[in-house]
Structure formats: C-alpha cells, structure tokens
Image (spheres, rainbow, N blue to C red):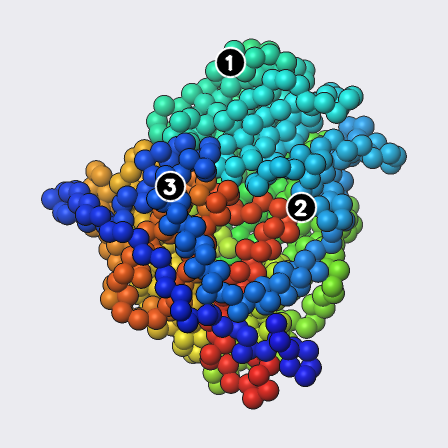
Amino acid sequence: MSRDSMGRDKTSDWRFDLEGAAPPVATQRDTRRIFHGRALDDPYDWLAAKNWREVLRDPDSLPIEIAKLIKAENAYCERLMAPLKSLRKTLVAEMRGRIKEDDSDAPEPDGPFAYYERFHLGAEHPRYCRTPRDGGTETVLLDGDALAKGHDFFEIGDATHAPDHAQLAWSVDDTGSELYEIRTRALSDGLDRADVVGDSDGSIVWRADSKAYYYVLIDENHRTSQIFRHDVGTDPANDALIIEETDSAWFVGLHESRCRRFAIVSIHGHDATECWLIDLRENNPTPRIVAPREPRLRYDVEPHGDLIYIRDNADGADDFRISVAPLAEPGRENWKDVVCHRDGVMIDGFTVYANHLVWLLRENSLPKLVIRALSTGEEHAIQFEEEAYALSIDPGLEFDTDTLRFVYSSMTTPDETYDYDMTTRTRILRKRQDIPSGHDPKRYVTKRIFATARDGESVPITLLHRADFSPGGKGAPLLLYGYGAYGYALSASFSEDILSLVDRGFVYARAHIRGGTDKGWRWYENGKLENKQNSFLDFIDCARSLISAGYTHEGAIVAQGGSAGGLLMGAVANAAPELFAGVVASVPFVDALNTMLRDDLPLTPPEWLEWGNPIASVEAYERIASYSPYDNVRAQHYPPILAIAGVTDPRVTYWEPLKWVAKLRATMSGGGPVLLFTHMGAGHAGASGRFEALEDAALEYAFALACVAPLLKNSDDSPPKC
C-alpha cells in the first residue's frame, strides 16, 4: 500500500476495483407458496439446501451448484477488494500489535490449585493450566493449539476440572456448527479416555464424586432438549436421561450452582423460564422443580444453604427483583422480596457467596455493582468515574470467599480485572489488558449522548473519537453499530480493534436502540413483536441525531450489525439508504419471513415469541413481511454492502445472506457494490483462532474505509484529519 511523505495511508488506495468484474448471478426459479391467502414468491428458495442438517456436520456435503455459487461470491468479493489487500494486511498487523501474544488470565483459586488460561507466542488457541494455589510448577491441562492442528475450525466450549482435581472434562466444536463432543482426561497422564459424548451444547457439570457428569444433548433439529448423565469410562449409548423437554419452543440449559451442591437446569423460552435442581451429591437424584412455568414468568436461581435466591419478574417486577424462599419449599407462593423492584432499574444478573449477595443492575444504560452482607443486610455499591463504561462479574470457582472478581472497561480504558474484598471494601488490580503497541487513553474521548426518537423516546448513544476531534461542520466519517433484539444490552466496553478506524479519523458510535434492555425491560418490549419497527426507526433517528450534532454528515455513516443486528442493517438499508456510505452485515438475519415460516429450523419455534408466528397468525405474517429485509428489497439506490456468512451456521443459515445479495443485485436501480464473503468451514462466530479472527475485522474495516474514501477532501491525500 502506498504512503504519503509522512508514512500515512493514502486514501487513493481505499477503493474497490469496479472495472471488469461481473458479479455472480444466481438463477431465479419460480417458487410460490400461499399463506393466509397471500402469495409468497421466492425465486431464490432453491439456495436453501434440503440437506442442511448434514451440511452442519459436514460442509463438504453442500450441493455442488450452491457451493459453486458461494465460491464465486467469495472470488468476486476478493476481486473487488483487491486494491485493499495491502490495507487489510496493515490493519491485521495493527490489530495484532494490540494483542499481548503471551497473555494469561488472572488465576482463579479453587481448593489446592489455581486455574487459568494462557496463550504462548503465536498461538491461536489457549492452553488451560493450573499451578498449586500458593505458587509452584505450572501444569498444562489442555493445549488448544496442539489439539487444533489439522482443523480448519476449532473451538473449545468448556474445560472444567472434576471436584477431585484429578480429571478434566472438555468439549470441542471442530466445524463451527455448535455441535460439541465431550471428552474426559486423566490429569495424572494427560490422556483422554475412549468414551466420547457427541452432539452436546458443550456445557458440563460434574457430579460431586467425580465419577459422572451431566450434559445437554442437541437433537436432530439442532435444539437443546435433553439432559443426560454420563458415567465416566462407560459407553455413552447407556447414558441416563434425566430431563427431557418435548416442546420445541423451549431451550434447555445447564450450569453449576455457586454453592456447587446442585446442577441447575434452566428450561426457557423467550418469555418464560422453568428451573430444576439436580443434587450433585446423589448418584441417582430425582430432579426438583423450583417453580412451574407460567406465561411471562422469568426467573433464575442460586441455592444457599437452606434457602434459594431467585431473580424474578413476578408480581409486575418487569425489571426484576431478587426474592428468597426455603429450599425445601421453593414454589412461587413462598417468594419474599430481598431486593425490591424499581421501574427502569434493570437487575441484569446476580450471584450469592457464603456471606454476600451481589447483583449487577443497569439504569439508563449504565451498569452498577451492589453488594449486601447477608449477616447484617448492609449494602454498598462500587463507584466508577467515567461517563460510560462496562462491568461484568467473574464469580470465580469458590463459594466461601469474601473476594468478588469483576472486570471494568470503557471505550477508552482496556479491561481491568479486580479482586474486591466485600468486607473491607478494598480492591486489588489483578490484571490490566496490555496493549503492546501502546495505548494512551488521553488520546481519545468517550461520552454518552442521547438522540430523540420520532415518538419522543430518548435513545442513548455511546461515542468514541480522537481527543483532537470536535463536532461541527460536516463532522467525520462515522461507524454506527446497532443490535436491538432479544433483550441484549449493548455495553460501553473497550474494543482494541476499532482503534484502527478511530485513529484514521472515524467517530465510533454504539446505538442503544429499543429491543435491548439498555433502559430496562420496557426497552426490550418496545422493540419486539408488534413494536419491532421501533428498533429500525431508533437506529435511523440516532444517525440523524449524530448528523445534526455535527459528528458526521448524511452519506458518511457506515452502519454495522450482526445476526439480529444484521436484520437491522437490512431494514435500515431499505428504509434510509441515503444516510449510509456503506453497510456491514455479519451473519445477517435478513430472510426473516421465510425463516419464521420454517418450523423445522433450529431457532424458529423458540423465536416466535420474539418475532411472531406467521404460520398461525395473519397479523404476524403481515407484520414480518412489512420489514423482512429480503422481502422489501426494491428498485432504489443502495449504498455499498458487505455481508459475511458461515456455511455451518446453525443460527443464521448461510442461505439468508446468499439470497439477500442475489435479490439486491437483481432489483436495485443503482449503487453498490454488493459483496458477500462466506466462511466455507465456520459458523455463526466466524473464524475460531484469535489471529484468524482479525482477518474478518480487517475485511470489514477495509470495506468501511473504501466506502468513505470518496467523501474525504484532504489535499495531501492522507487519512482524514479530525
């Protein structure tokens, strides 16, 4: 890549090669189905492989004609982005330079040992290690890089030691399809046993005697539906079925309680939960229900001695409260408040230690940690100073401890891991994320502003930009990220990768739109089902607010979102293409109507409560049809679009972006280019290695830079100045 006299990237190299390369053309085949008396035409329906279940396990089984088209799309993407090859290499080098290659977690003590993950120089995957608690020789329990050799994709899901500290159970996905195999390893010799459990979701909970573990099985439609117990060293075909969920609209999850006495089974849909307890001290326990499922009743639990603590939304506690009940009689009729509900103050999560109750709340999109001493009821919050920041609890491995571990960051501050003494109220910094190439937070500014939506709602926006930038005039190119679904709240956490755009003059913004719980459960309810359009309108109103405030200008915004955020990208590209210089849509859920009409797909029945059931309801059909990006592509000018997909993605099937791109090219009246890159051997999360993943980020950022390059007016042809 050429440079100017000062060694800076030249914007003349930020361009697409639009000469001579014709995009692939997908054949249109007449397909018409009738729903509620309405005709649904889908000329690209054939791109959805009939053997999709087989493809998830073996991507080479993809039908030849479809595989050929996907490979042609990949070649076309690389051809058009050929002038950006050097820029992409530079971006990868920059981002890799911000990663400490020989990094290590802060060790977590558990009994006689302390456990942690560690990377060695050049490693894509971590090693799982331990040392004696008070120091001594390290033992490598699992070497991710060595195990990953020969695999295009490799992801360890769980690696958990047995209570006797003599065994390790670990799960691995080597296709990207989120189908995990579980193996057990004797730590005395480091060898895996012959018995392998397949088709699990990766989660593992050991029985207290270390002779068996519980796991979740995934069924033929890729849904979590059963809990089994596996006795170590035996044939998995003889595993005992413990719990089975027959309703396809419910997921089954599994984790260990903080007190380590129980396995907690959470059976959950999109609007309700049902929890069961499995006593880990018993060889053949009978699962015990906490409270039977009720419509719209959500709860999660933590046993504590003779009590059980419950985070729940019962009795109108929409933003959740924390209750307590006798463990012997945990039914809803016995729930008593210990942390009362407050409207607009969302209790995101909680945990219980031997002597303390801890919860993480969110108010007006800002998080806070609160701690209560169980013996006295005295409580306090941990204070932070920045205008916008992110917090997470790392509950650790021990129950009887006064130490709370949490992680703090902001858009300018890299991750800081603290051990906090809940009794003395003192904190010790255990680890600060190291940026080897250097990072000075004072060179950047993070702030929280609010956009006024067209219906009067106040939508938070978190911003990051260089300290030498001031809004005004035409502002700067801006990357606007959004999600807005499933109640997921966007954090204001640190991202080392985004600095590659910010250092080149971009403003980076995260829009906390409706559909998340950034402002409480109401914020989520007002962005789903019949209110889904609010998510799209909020994002557009955030863009216009940033323009009005002088952070950017119309046509200088690159929109970015993935998965359900990819639906957002498709919807706003249809509704307001003039606002955007480009759109980056990762594994985008853009074929919403057709997917919700397929009750055989992994996520469809559970997600009818998020989007609506167009099979059963004409109102839901019409509502989804009104915004589904694929169904609303029209003859208009579209900005450049980059879509990224994965052949083995069980969440957003590869054919959604493939169909969308084909229809865009066949329908749009101008604009583009429209590009698609599909991982042939990876799924929803993209490449699995920590450095391999940088290639995806570099592709997206180089695309964004090429989108805004024609708008830059720098006489010295250097990167944009703030």
Residue where numbered disc 2 is placed: 124
Outermost residue toward the bottom? 715
Tag nearer the camera, 2 or 3:
3
Query: Tag 3's secondary structure?
Result: helix
Query: Tag 2's secondary structure?
Result: loop
Task: Please state the total of marks drawn on the protein image.
Answer: 3
In the rendered structure, find residue 237 and report the number of the disc placed on it: 1
Q: Quadrant of residue 567?
A: bottom left
Position above or below: 485 against 301: below
Closer to the camera in the image, 698 or 267 = 698
Q: What amino acid is labelled 1 in the image?
A: Ala
Residue depicted at x 67% and y 34%? 147
Tag nearer the camera, 3 or 1:
3
Closer to the camera in the image, 608 or 665 = 665
Q: Is residue 518 visible?
A: yes
Residue depicted at x 39% and y 32%? 53
Q: Residues within 10 Å of mark 1 (few under 14, many from 20)?
A: few
Residue 570 in picture, x, y percent from top left: 35, 58
Task: Give me the C-alpha separation between circle 1 and circle 2.
Answer: 34 Å
Position above or below: 88 against 430: below
Position above or below: 413 against 192: below
Residue 377 in picture, x, y percent from top left: 64, 40
In the rendered structure, find residue 64 and report the number of the disc placed on it: 3
Residue depicted at x 50% and y 42%? 681
